Image: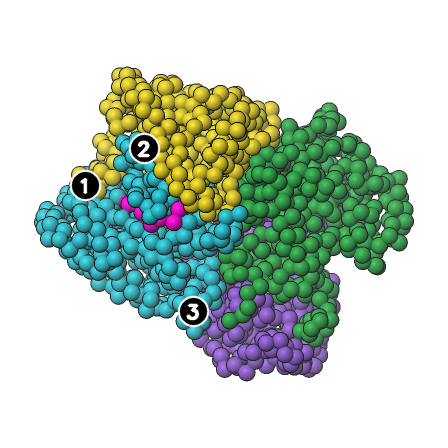
Chain colours: A yellow, B cyan, C purple, D green
Amino acid sequence: MAGNTFGTIFRLTTFGESHGPALGGVIDGCPPGVPVTEALIQRDLDRRRPGAGGLTGTARKEPDAVRLLSGIFEGESTGTPIAFAIENTDQRSRDYEAAKNLLRPGHADGTYLAKYGRRDYRGGGRASARETAARVAGGAVAASLLSGRGIDVFAYTVEFGGLPATVIDAAGAADRPFCAPDPAVIPAWEARAKQAMGSGDSLGGIVEVTATGVPAGLGEPVFDKLDARLAYALMGIGAVKGVEIGVGFAAARLTGSTNNDPIVNPPESNNAGGILGGISNGQPVTVRAAIKPIPSIAVPQRTTDIAGNPAEIVVGGRHDRSAIPRVVPVIRAMVLLVVADFLLAQQAVRPVGAPWV
Amino acid sequence: MAGNTFGTIFRLTTFGESHGPALGGVIDGCPPGVPVTEALIQRDLDRRRPGAGGLTGTARKEPDAVRLLSGIFEGESTGTPIAFAIENTDQRSRDYEAAKNLLRPGHADGTYLAKYGRRDYRGGGRASARETAARVAGGAVAASLLSGRGIDVFAYTVEFGGLPATVIDAAGAADRPFCAPDPAVIPAWEARAKQAMGSGDSLGGIVEVTATGVPAGLGEPVFDKLDARLAYALMGIGAVKGVEIGVGFAAARLTGSTNNDPIVNPPESNNAGGILGGISNGQPVTVRAAIKPIPSIAVPQRTTDIAGNPAEIVVGGRHDRSAIPRVVPVIRAMVLLVVADFLLAQQAVRPVGAPWV
Amino acid sequence: MAGNTFGTIFRLTTFGESHGPALGGVIDGCPPGVPVTEALIQRDLDRRRPGAGGLTGTARKEPDAVRLLSGIFEGESTGTPIAFAIENTDQRSRDYEAAKNLLRPGHADGTYLAKYGRRDYRGGGRASARETAARVAGGAVAASLLSGRGIDVFAYTVEFGGLPATVIDAAGAADRPFCAPDPAVIPAWEARAKQAMGSGDSLGGIVEVTATGVPAGLGEPVFDKLDARLAYALMGIGAVKGVEIGVGFAAARLTGSTNNDPIVNPPESNNAGGILGGISNGQPVTVRAAIKPIPSIAVPQRTTDIAGNPAEIVVGGRHDRSAIPRVVPVIRAMVLLVVADFLLAQQAVRPVGAPWV
Amino acid sequence: MAGNTFGTIFRLTTFGESHGPALGGVIDGCPPGVPVTEALIQRDLDRRRPGAGGLTGTARKEPDAVRLLSGIFEGESTGTPIAFAIENTDQRSRDYEAAKNLLRPGHADGTYLAKYGRRDYRGGGRASARETAARVAGGAVAASLLSGRGIDVFAYTVEFGGLPATVIDAAGAADRPFCAPDPAVIPAWEARAKQAMGSGDSLGGIVEVTATGVPAGLGEPVFDKLDARLAYALMGIGAVKGVEIGVGFAAARLTGSTNNDPIVNPPESNNAGGILGGISNGQPVTVRAAIKPIPSIAVPQRTTDIAGNPAEIVVGGRHDRSAIPRVVPVIRAMVLLVVADFLLAQQAVRPVGAPWV
């Protein structure tokens, strides 16, 4: 759980730049017997591939074909590391040569230079959203593990360009434009997207996740709370600037008597988002992430070159107009990784679901 | 960075329940030569001790006197683990006997049972806010390390009971009631607090942190982003239900051209909160946390006993009416721990502030 | 598993110098329901306390009384961190003032200076063997966990001052002088010890550990092999200069046909020491550690002061004449910690002892 | 530092089975600016490839061609993860079908089944020595980092089949048969190897490592001692059954006055192996590993099938007759990884080589 590794028991390490030979990852700690195939991973990858975004997506067309390198025998995990790679095939590096000495506002160009003293300037290098393909692949393996235990994770857009959705049909969202939870909101969102594209600008939104079937007892009570790890997981996505659990920021304006969920069967509310004291309580786990507008815009911006001289920049290249909906499967993947990790970790404490003494 | 340990290089491990013999912690990885005394830690501890909250605080009066057990020689750290303990002296466990079989809404009673199969029911055990004293002590050591490098961290309440502060004087806030950033807002907040106390209810709010002097280059670019670790740190506090960086959730409603900070000298805006691509950019780092209303209220609530039978509960004991302001130094401490950890970690990469190649 | 923390699931963090206020530790990850009392820990501590060594031991008389600070409720672990402290009561720091500017041969004086730029020169500070008391306390908790699962760990001296024991009665050794596995060897070892004491010199030896009841399947197959972790655990004790598993170095001189243990029921040999491919095979786990002679000797030695000027030193103070037998319970404790950690870790993979598919 | 990841700052994660699509690894934490090319890694890989062993080696001929997937830009590390893969091209899996239900003595067949409930039986799967190719690749990157800081690591065979070398020419050993430190010993070792081959048996030996240029101050003083990590690193190699530092097991038979190295300039002895109190002292670091005879032998052995029925097995396939010399570059690689990790870690404590205060 440091650098490029996520998790403590079910651990995903990712590698790769947008314009290097390949990107991929290694999953360590997956228990034996989990069904894993390239097709299973590919299905999730295809949901975040370039072009998946409809109106909001980049024109870059890569198949993002995943190849399993290890850890699988006869279609199931063996318990050893599951490595996978995705070749980079469509790399027009020359697009980036022109601007290699300019710092793009809202991007990590300058901070990479401050950290490493140098950077791979082609397409954002490791800071490229392309890195998240490896997370989605890792999440697909976690999903296979979890679905065998009755746990499902749904992610969907609840607000786009300032326009909220009001009806939430979580299960169908993955197959709709914008990962919309309500077909009725799509036309308004399309209009909003076209408007932004017309002005060369970009948009953000809010993505919500609901995890169902999460057993009570997952999470560590102090630093490593389930909600803390979810916040870490989602804020570790480049486009995310805020994370909230249950009613989240709205809780700050409630009183204890209106915010507390009464303990009744069946539950009448879930303001806590399925987590109390950092540990799941058996209700659905709900979390939301604020997605900033993509910083690559065709509008001229003030900046400097790497020597500090003032300059103006118009970011060319083939870029999405919003991280939505391509970030949605990434967010889902991170939640899957968190839940899988805690589920396995809990088995070292006591059997999940065992009675109280 | 698992369970009860926070950090990777500068690591704090905490221990202790509200009603056990003592609570405390161990700081591992503090470099040699950092000034550390009991008085230095005590000063920060006193800011979060019971009674510090004025109108919002509990009547429990514990001195919370810290004792250094190791790692200090002649007033400075030696590089070996710095352990400290705070004795629990005022433990009225009998207050809790009556309700030991009832699950308190909004509390971790049931989730601890689900996780461990048992619980120390006296005063919330490890889930008690009292555990955070150890975090504040750890943060005080981090503050001493960081102040020697020109880094300061300020935390203050920007909203209480739904009433926002409009003027922000960060430096003076720690000494004001509610850690208010503006003296003018205090009367309204006091009235709001009295109103809630009168009805036996509790209140929440929003706390903001500004870290100044943070050099560019801190943070790991993928999972372990500076903002991800901050979100993890703050969401790991029991009362926190949401975290946002820079403009945070508001970014979801901006466009790229209005959200991007132009790169100019001096900076004109800081929507990014001093972090780009998960790495500090040299501007102040800003983060906000949503604080839920304390779940212990004198209002009758529906619940069950541990066998699942419906019941009504009125939570007695001596409880705060709001986590604000006692949570404020805890939030500050967590930010201090994050920054200290990344500052040391960066030294393994390249000297902080070294020129670009 | 870094710095002053040992283990990944069952984690022990230790703190404390020989001449600071206290030493102790925090056990994080102990599952709930393990019987833990001060008396249970004290029994193991008493086996390594000053004076326990008979002829070989120091005259320093400290009770080494352990105090539990957290994590225990009604005599059993709750699942939260178990902290404990041992006060330092008999600190004659002035014994060390005289030699504070001289580097003691065979000691860590110079290397601490190189690492930290300073050192707590009183009694070796953190490098003192006194630190190992915290390991023994941690091991006692691990022993309580393991004995509930049918696992026992025995440690005993198989060679002292160059004189090997030939008969091995592991179970009775802990109560005999030198932790001798054979009462018949004691007179010869006593004579050897007296001879060394007479000349102001010190002695070493070899300690063996046998862990019985270890189920098959513990250990991670690549870096984190059971034998690798055992080697790490034992070589992390100051006095240990070599570690071997099963027949160990002797295997280098065997052929495959004589070294391989035939797979028969019951087993006819255990050259492998109960570990194949880094994973336990269900036979007893056996490991040996080479103990160097204690470097503190009354014989004059050539050295330098901290400025590099040549000098002669005679190490005064109250020192053991051999790490044996006081190191024996430390070695046992480290093995207990390793086995406990892997036992819990394995539960995240699949139930221990579950049938093959 | 768990499962398939080695190190805390400079971290190597490996993946791959002997008969899967590929094996490889990810290096996380390599600082920017280290020269890394496929040729640089290939040179070290070629030293451990099948056939490199001369008389002792397998007939399996794989090019073991490494391919860099990420983290390198214009021939130098960027600071982001360096991933590499080696395709498996010569996989005669059918060789293993016949014996898939038999447990090979001295192998991990049964322990993998106990751990995972299943196994990839083709060629040992993850337990194959082939996995160590990834370690050698990782070590090559560490070597490039370290050579830039004046640190070199030499590994060589000091004993083979019971026959010791008496002259040590470390620098030339890598290019000699058996990695012999003395050309004169080679004929005797060849004769010993031929004798063992003739009887279908296998041989072991002892490998020594000397690391020169290691600055004083590397290592953590308690659990994570430099010698502890070296023991962990080497015992984590399948063929290693014992590890010793400096004079190692011989120290157990010395007295303090003969084992202590006097502190003189220049040093007159190095019994401590360059490590005091777990921290390097500036002298060469020396460590030895006992290599067991390879368990795959053509001699009939008693065993059982996976159902526990008695059986006889003659291990076919193409196997080495000794792990020596192919294990020698693996041992060197592990030492390189340890030293690189501690060198970087120390920079978080204080600048390496800074004066004492």
Q: Please give the name of the residue rendered at 28% of the width and 27% of the height, measured from the top-left corner.
A: A161
- The chain that hosts pointer 3 is B
Q: Quadrant of residue D132?
A: top right
Q: Is residue A335 magenta?
A: no
Question: Eyeballing the image, is C24 above or below C355?
Answer: below
Mark 2 and mark 3: span between their CA atoms?
49 Å
Viewer-proximal residue, C186 or A131?
A131
Q: Hey, what amino acid is under mark 2?
A: Ser
- In the rendered image, residues at marks 2 and 1 fall on the same chain: no
Q: Position of residue D253 (x, y in %)?
A: 73, 68
Q: Please give the name of the residue rendered at 25% of the width and 26% of the height, measured from the top-left corner.
A: A164
Label pair 2/3, CB-CB below 8 angstroms: no
Q: Which mark is residue B257?
A: 2
Mark 3: few/some/many CA within 10 Å (<14, 14-19, 20+): some
Q: Is residue A264 visible?
A: yes
Viewer-proximal residue, D245 or D281?
D281
Mark 1 element type: helix
Q: Where is mark 3, residue-wise?
A: B76
Q: Where is mark 1, residue-wise?
A: A253
Mark 1 and mark 3: span between their CA atoms?
44 Å
Tell me the quadrant of the picture where the C terminus of chain C can be found: top right
Mark 2 and mark 1: span between their CA atoms?
31 Å
Magenta stretch in the rendered image: B279-289
Q: Position of residue B251 (x, y in %)?
A: 30, 35
- The chain that hosts pointer 2 is B
Q: Please give the name of the residue rendered at 47% of the width and 67% of the height, measured from the top-left corner.
A: B78
Viewer-proximal residue, D197 or A25?
A25
Task: Describe residue C90's horizontal placement relative to residue B182 as left or right.
Answer: right
